[in-house]
C-alpha cells in the first residue's frame, strides 16, 4: 500500500555544507516515520535524485544508517588537503579555490593528522570487511568526481571528464587515480626518433639545447626573422652565398659542410655532403647503441651545430671570425674530454683509432 506524507517533524540534523541541507522526519499516512533530506538554496538539485518542491528546494529520502562525512569529521582533525577537498565538494559556486572564512568557521574541523581511515577501522573490525568497504568508498568518491564537474575542477580534471566514456572501463578495471587512467587513455606517440641523438648520457646541455632548437627549426635564423617581419636581410654570414635558413646553415652552407667533413674524417666515416633532412634521418637510424663511435658522433654533431650557430652569432654581433680549423679544434677539445673517464675497451681497433684521432687519453 502506498503511503503519502502527512506532516513534517522538527529538524533532526543539519549537514555540514554551507547550503545546510537538513534532515527532517516526516510522518507517513501509514503511521511510519521517514527521514528526508531537505535541500534548498544554491544547491544544484539536478545532481541528486531530489523530489523538487520548487526549482531550488526539494527532498530526497534519507537512507537509515547514513552518516554525513562532515558529521563524522566534526571535532576531529583532518589534513589540510582533505579539508580543501571537502570544501571543493561543497556545493556553493565559488570563484576562489581557497576555503572561505565562513567555511572554516562553520566547519568545526581542525587541521592535523588524517582520521578518515579510522572510520573504516572503527566500524569494520574484520580486516577483509575493512578493506572491502574502504575500497568501495574510494571507488565511489572517485566515481563521483569522475562524473560531476564543478567550476573548481582543474584543467586536467576537465580534460579527463571529456574522456569519460573511455575512462570508465579503465576505472572499473581498478585503476584508481587520474594519472593511471590518463596513462591508459592517452595516445602514446612514438618518441621523436631524434630524441636519443640529443639526450644521451654524455650529452652537454648547452649543445643539446641548441641542437634541439635546430631540429625544431626554432633558432632565429634570418629566414625565420624575415618570415616574422623582423628583418629584410637574409644572406648567410658564413658564406654570403645563400639565404640563411636552418637547412642551409647546418648542412648546405659550404663552410659548415667543410667543417662537418673534417669531423667525419676524424671518425673514419666517408660520407657525401648531405641535406639537413638526410643527415637527420641517417643519424637517427645509424647512431644507436653504446659504442664509443656512436657516443662520439652524437657529441660531435651537437657540438658542430652549437659551434656553427655560435660562429654565426660571433660574426653577426661581434664581428669576430674563426676559421674552420679553429672551430674543429674547439669541437675536438670538447668531444675528447667527454668520454675520458669512461671504461673503454682500448684494445678494440676502432676504439684505438677513435681515441688517437680525438685525443681521448
Ligand atoms: Zn652559408
Image: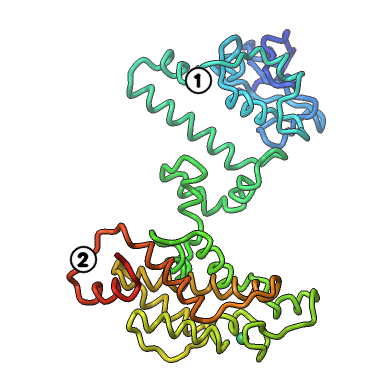
Helix, strand or loop for disc 2: loop
Quadrant occupied by the C terminus = bottom left
Instruction: Confirm if mark 1 falls within 8 A of ligand 1.
Output: no
Mark 2–mark 1 contact, CB under 8 Å?
no
- Comparing 66 with 278, the one in front is 278
Residue 116: numbered disc: 1
x and y percentages locating residue 113 in the rendered image: 51, 17
Looking at the rendered image, the disc whose residue lies closer to the viewer, 2 or 1, is: 2
- Comparing 281 with 87, the one in front is 281
Instruction: Please tell me which residue is depicted at 56% across the width and 21% down the height of the picture.
Output: 79
Give the side of residue 263 with respect to residue 20, left or right: left
Compared to 294, does 70 lie above or below? above
Ligand 1, seen in the image, is in the quarter at bottom right
Instruction: Tell which circle, 2 or 1, labels the residue nearer the N-terminal end.
Output: 1
Binning the other alpha carbons within 10 Å of mark 1 as few (below 14), some (14 to 19) or many (20 upward) gives some
Residue 137: numbered disc: none
Residue that numbered label 2 is attached to? 345
Which quadrant would residue 225 be assigned to in this image? bottom right
Compared to 149, does 287 lie above or below? below
- Between the C-alphas of marks 2 and 1, the distance is 59 Å
Which quadrant would residue 215 be assigned to in this image? bottom right
x and y percentages locating residue 116 in the rendered image: 50, 20
- Comparing 251 with 81, the one in front is 251
x and y percentages locating residue 118 in the rendered image: 45, 16
Instruction: Confirm if mark 2 falls within 8 A of ligand 1.
Output: no
x and y percentages locating residue 41 in the rendered image: 80, 26
Instruction: Please tell me which residue is depicted at 70% across the width and 77% down the height of the picture.
Output: 224
Compared to 185, does 53 lie above or below? above
Helix, strand or loop for disc 1: helix
Which quadrant would residue 244 be assigned to in this image? bottom right
- Comparing 325 with 194, the one in front is 325
Amino acid at each position: 500500500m502506498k503511503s503519502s506524507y502527512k506532516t513534517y517533524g522538527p529538524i533532526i540534523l543539519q549537514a555540514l555544507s554551507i547550503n545546510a541541507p537538513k534532515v527532517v522526519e516526516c510522518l507517513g499516512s501509514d503511521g511510519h516515520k521517514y527521514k528526508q533530506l531537505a535541500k534548498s538554496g544554491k544547491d544544484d538539485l539536478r545532481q541528486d535524485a531530489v523530489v523538487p518542491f520548487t526549482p531550488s528546494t526539494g527532498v530526497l529520502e534519507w537512507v537509515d544508517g547514513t552518516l554525513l562525512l562532515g558529521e563524522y569529521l566534526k571535532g576531529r582533525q583532518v589534513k589540510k588537503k582533505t579539508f580543501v577537498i571537502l570544501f571543493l565538494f561543497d556545493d556553493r559556486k565559488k570563484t576562489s579555490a581557497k576555503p572561505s572564512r565562513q567555511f572554516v568557521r562553520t566547519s568545526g574541523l581542525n587541521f592535523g593528522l588524517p582520521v578518515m581511515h579510522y572510520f573504516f577501522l572503527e566500524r569494520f573490525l574484520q580486516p577483509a570487511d575493512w578493506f572491502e568497504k574502504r575500497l568501495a568508498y574510494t571507488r565511489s568518491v572517485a566515481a563521483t568526481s569522475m562524473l560531476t564537474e564543478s567550476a573548481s575542477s582543474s584543467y586536467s580534471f576537465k580534460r579527463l571528464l571529456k574522456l569519460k566514456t573511455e575512462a570508465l572501463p579503465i576505472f572499473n578495471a581498478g585503476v584508481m587515480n587520474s594519472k593511471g587512467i590518463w596513462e591508459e587513455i592517452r595516445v602514446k606517440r612514438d618518441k621523436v626518433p631524434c630524441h636519443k641523438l640529443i639526450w644521451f648520457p654524455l650529452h652537454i646541455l648547452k649543445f643539446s639545447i641548441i641542437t634541439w632548437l635546430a631540429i625544431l627549426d626554432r633558432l632565429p635564423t634570418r629566414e625565420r626573422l624575415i618570415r616574422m617581419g623582423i628583418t629584410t636581410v637574409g644572406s648567410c654570414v658564413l658564406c654570403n652565398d645563400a639565404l640563411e635558413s636552418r637547412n642551409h646553415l647546418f648542412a648546405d652552407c659550404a663552410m659548415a659542410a667543410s667543417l662537418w667533413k673534417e669531423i667525419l674524417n676524424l671518425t673514419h666515416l666517408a660520407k657525401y655532403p648531405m641535406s639537413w633532412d638526410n643527415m637527420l634521418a641517417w643519424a637517427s637510424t645509424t647512431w644507436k647503441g653504446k659504442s664509443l663511435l656512436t657516443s662520439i658522433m652524437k657529441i660531435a654533431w651537437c657540438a658542430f651545430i652549437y659551434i656553427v650557430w655560435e660562429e654565426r652569432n660571433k660574426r653577426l654581433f661581434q664581428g669576430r671570425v674563426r676559421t674552420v680549423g679553429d672551430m674543429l679544434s674547439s669541437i675536438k677539445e670538447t668531444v675528447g674530454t667527454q668520454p675520458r673517464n669512461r671504461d673503454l675497451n682500448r684494445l678494440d681497433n676502432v676504439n684505438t683509432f677513435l681515441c688517437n684521432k680525438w685525443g681521448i687519453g
